[in-house]
């Protein structure tokens, strides 16, 4: 081979090797980039189908105050939150005390409250994830506005029939990719239940759960609702015939309470032990006891009426831990 031919061969070889290295490098970059792109979002199964949500959300808007506490427990950033929690806070209210400090620390904005979701405000916050649904009127508002909300950012609605705090916590943790934190929270709860159960004296009689509302209409909390279910773990026995005593009134599928006529009070609220849960603006147990209609009821006569705050009614994780403290004090 002549010197010139050898030189040309070497040049071509260098070119081929260079091209090969470049191709490998590009292939390597493509291979690395693909997982990186996939790690940016992840699929979540919802009642609206599979939704791609951020793998690490940084600007979450939560449109039901009853769900917001979980996000702080899971240590994720909440850009804005609806303040409303049934019986605790309503319109023109501050954030609920259970998570107000966490909201202040994060700089969480308050979602304006109205007859419908303020979609313009939500858009102005520039969320990368919106969480709504759950129970109550705020849940209905976010369901009604789903199409508008999902045009702003990925929107996940929790089902209305998921009422237990453990299930709500697990679902929200899955949405925000923090399932690794759930175990420690539930373990802390289990330890506390064990401690409280061993320290209290649980009444042997059946228990009724009375919801005191601002309108004065008597209401009972269903025995399978969140609060009775919690206290069942401690050994309390809910009156499971309370609905039948009221004549089996028709219920909304997602309802966890029912109203009834005051004429049926002595028949419906005849449990030997009663928990009263006063919602915002309603009479507490002491004021109800002054009413002759209530004073004649067995639990009121025997002074076996106990009051729990509205945060115990549909408790989130913070509410349930606080409720355990209250039960520990009342039944020690």
Image (cartoon, grey):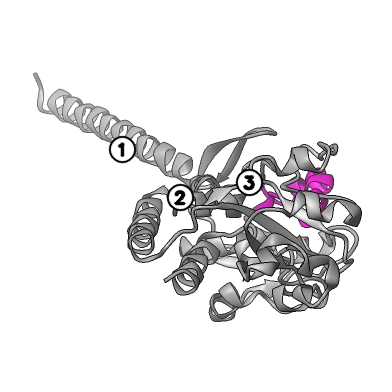
User: In terms of image quadrants, where is residue 123?
Assistant: bottom right
Q: Which residue is mark 2?
A: 233
The image's mark for residue 82 is none
Classed neighbour count for the residue bearing mark 1: other residues with Cα under 10 Å, few (<14), some (14–19), many (≥20): few
Q: Which residue is mark 3?
A: 239
Query: Can residue 78 be found in the magenta stretch?
Result: no
Q: Which residue is mark 1?
A: 25
Badge nearest the viewer, 2 or 1: 2
Q: Is residue 322 visible?
A: yes
Circle 3 SS class: loop
Residue that extends furthest to the top in the rendered view of this protein: 1
Badge nearest the viewer, 3 or 2: 3
Quarter holding the N terminus is top left
Vertically, is 99 above or below 257? Answer: below
User: In terms of image quadrants, where is residue 2?
Assistant: top left
Vertically, is 188 above or below 259? Answer: below
In terms of sequence position, does the residue under pointer 2 or pointer 1 come before the other?
Answer: 1
166 or 59, nearer to the observer: 166
Q: Looking at the image, which residue is at 44% across and 54% down?
A: 234
User: In terms of image quadrants, where is residue 4?
Assistant: top left
In terms of sequence position, does the residue under pointer 3 or pointer 2 come before the other?
Answer: 2
Residue extent of the magenta highlight: 130-156
In terms of sequence position, does the residue under pointer 3 or pointer 1 come before the other?
Answer: 1
Circle 2 SS class: loop
Cα separation, mark 3 vs mark 1, equals: 70 Å
Q: Looking at the image, which residue is at 56% across and 59% down?
A: 316
């Amino acid at each position: 081979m002549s010197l010139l031919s050898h030189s040309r061969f070497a040049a071509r070889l260098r070119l081929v090797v260079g091209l090969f290295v470049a191709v490998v490098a590009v292939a390597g970059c493509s291979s690395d980039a693909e997982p990186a792109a996939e790690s940016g979002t992840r699929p979540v199964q919802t009642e609206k189908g599979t939704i791609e949500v951020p793998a690490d959300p940084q600007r979450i808007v939560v449109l039901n105050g009853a769900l917001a506490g979980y996000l702080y427990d899971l240590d994720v950033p909440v850009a804005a939150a609806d303040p409303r929690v049934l019986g605790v806070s309503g319109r023109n209210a501050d954030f609920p005390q259970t998570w107000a400090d966490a909201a202040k620390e994060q700089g969480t904005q308050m979602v304006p409250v109205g007859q419908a979701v303020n979609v313009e405000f939500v858009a102005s916050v520039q969320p990368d994830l919106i969480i709504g649904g759950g129970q109550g009127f705020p849940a209905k508002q976010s369901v009604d506005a789903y199409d508008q909300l999902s045009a702003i950012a990925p929107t996940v609605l929790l089902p209305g029939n998921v009422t237990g705090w453990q299930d709500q916590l697990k679902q929200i943790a899955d949405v925000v990719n923090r399932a690794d934190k759930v175990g420690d929270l539930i373990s802390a709860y289990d330890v506390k239940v064990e401690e409280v159960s061993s320290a209290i004296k649980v009444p042997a009689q059946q228990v009724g759960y009375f919801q005191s509302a601002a309108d004065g209409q008597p209401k009972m909390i269903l025995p399978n609702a969140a609060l009775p279910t919690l206290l069942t773990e401690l050994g309390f026995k809910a009156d499971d015939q309370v609905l039948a005593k009221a004549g089996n009134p028709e219920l909304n599928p997602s309802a966890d309470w029912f109203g009834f006529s005051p004429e049926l009070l002595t028949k419906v609220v005849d449990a030997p032990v009663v928990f009263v849960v006063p919602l915002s603006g309603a009479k507490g147990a002491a004021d109800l006891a002054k009413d002759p209609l209530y004073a004649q009821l067995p639990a009121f006569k025997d002074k076996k009426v106990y009051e729990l705050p509205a945060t115990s009614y549909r408790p989130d994780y913070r509410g349930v831990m606080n409720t355990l403290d209250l039960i520990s004090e009342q039944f020690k």
